[in-house]
Image (cartoon, rainbow, N blue to C red):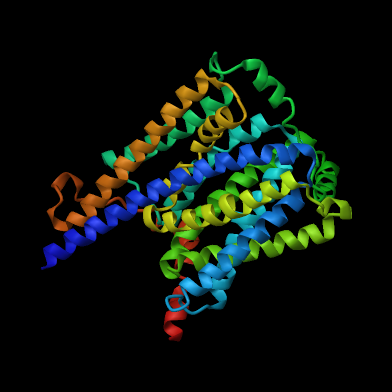
Amino acid sequence: MTAAAMVVGGSAAERDARLAHYAMAFVQLFNGGYHVITKVALNVGVNQLVFCVCRDLLALSILAPLAYFRERRTRPPMTRSLLLSFFFLGLSGVFGNQLLFLVGLTYTNPTYAAAIQPSIPVFTFLLAVMMGTERVNLMRIEGQTKVGGTLVCVLGAVFMVLFRGPVLLGDKDADFAMHSEISAKGQPEPTGWLVTGFLDLGFEQWHIGVLCLIGNCMCMAAFIAIQAPVLKKYPANLSVAALSYFSGTVLMVTTAFFMVKEPLDWKLTQAEVLAVIYAGVVASALNFGMLTWSNKIIGPALVALYNPLQPAASAFLSRIFLGSPIFLGSIVGGFFIILGLYMVTWASFRERKAMAAGIAIPSHSARTSEPLKKNPVVSRLGQLFSGLASSSKSAD
């Protein structure tokens, strides 16, 4: 009976893991569609902060009712520590992630902004290992494959962005005309005081943009890595997504209220409204919900590793809807991205099978990979969020 239960549980876990991988692939595909659809709206000159506020409010209006009614009976009790966690998730994953990217894009260029995004899986992997939510042992083939697959995936994304090569499909002249329009029009208002402060310290605008893009990647990595232990203690997926988005939306609306000076900036054209609807419903609410659920199933390292698929998805959809050409670099980079994903997925599958087998695992794999929990400094990172619910349980 125990063996049968293990088989059923194992098959259910494998099914959930497979669905989580499919979900993350669709998340990046939808994000690619977001870049294509909003490209026209943002280039027309819509205020980027206003665009984010409308997008976040729409997403929250979808996530909040779903979370309230679907998880009304399964939602754990709320504590002050959990509220602090949700505030930090909203600060990093919604407010900081979106705003820092827009500010960084304003003072650099789209090519550099795209080139630095593949650092998200690296930051996430390091944070997850330090917090103990991801296990890796470089003395075993699984650990070596995880690290190697992460590097291959990141290098594939960087190669796709920096190397174009000859055109395989489409017209190169059409891409040049489109690329010349991708500039930072409608610079966000809140950058004024921020830039002034850094300029007084001797920074140049390019340096400010680079710092903001690095901060954007670190915010997204922190959000994914910290969300995983929070989900273990507060397993209501939709509620975690809704509460995190609520915190981020409050911060975004407050910032826009004080920083957007022109009332006309709040008026959107029909095309901009359609872009906001897609961004709020698909790229925010749907993607945020699927990312949160997938983070609970396959862990933060694999979730973050799907981010390099965004350039490939964007190039593919741009070719279909905008007529953009496909370069050799996109094909080669996409191949290495898929190869890296396969390597990490294979290593994670081997580790799950070894853990499910228990004492039946071979002797060469008997040593389970240990996270960096014995270090008192890095262990506090994981305990800060993974131990939040202990107080709520004791209170019961």
Please provide percent x and percent y for residue 107: 76, 36
Q: Is residue 195 left or right of residue 219?
A: right
Count of all numbered marks drawn on residues in the image: 0
x%, y% of residue 96? Answer: 66, 53
Q: Please identify the residue farthest to the front as the structure is shown.
A: 270
Q: Quadrant of residue 59?
A: bottom right
Quick one: which residue is furthest to the bottom in this view?
396
Q: Is residue 89 left or right of residue 261?
A: left
Q: Position of residue 374 (x, y in %)?
A: 38, 58
* Residue shown at 78% from the left, 57% from the top: 256
Does residue 152 lie above or below 172 as drawn? below
Q: Residue at x 59, y 70 (%)?
A: 84
The C terminus appears in which quarter of the rendering? bottom left
Q: Is residue 138 visible?
A: no
Looking at the image, can residue 127 be seen?
Answer: yes
Looking at the rendered image, the quarter that the N terminus falls into is: bottom left
For residue 328, above or below residue 2: above
- Residue drawn at x 50%, y 58% is 289
Q: Which residue is more in the foreground, 385 or 328?
A: 328
Q: Residue at x 60, y 43 (%)?
A: 34
Residue 249, by quadrant, is: bottom right
Relative to 180, say whether 292 is above or below: below
Query: Left of 116 or right of it: where is 385?
Result: left
Residue 155 locus on image (x, y percent) = 48, 29
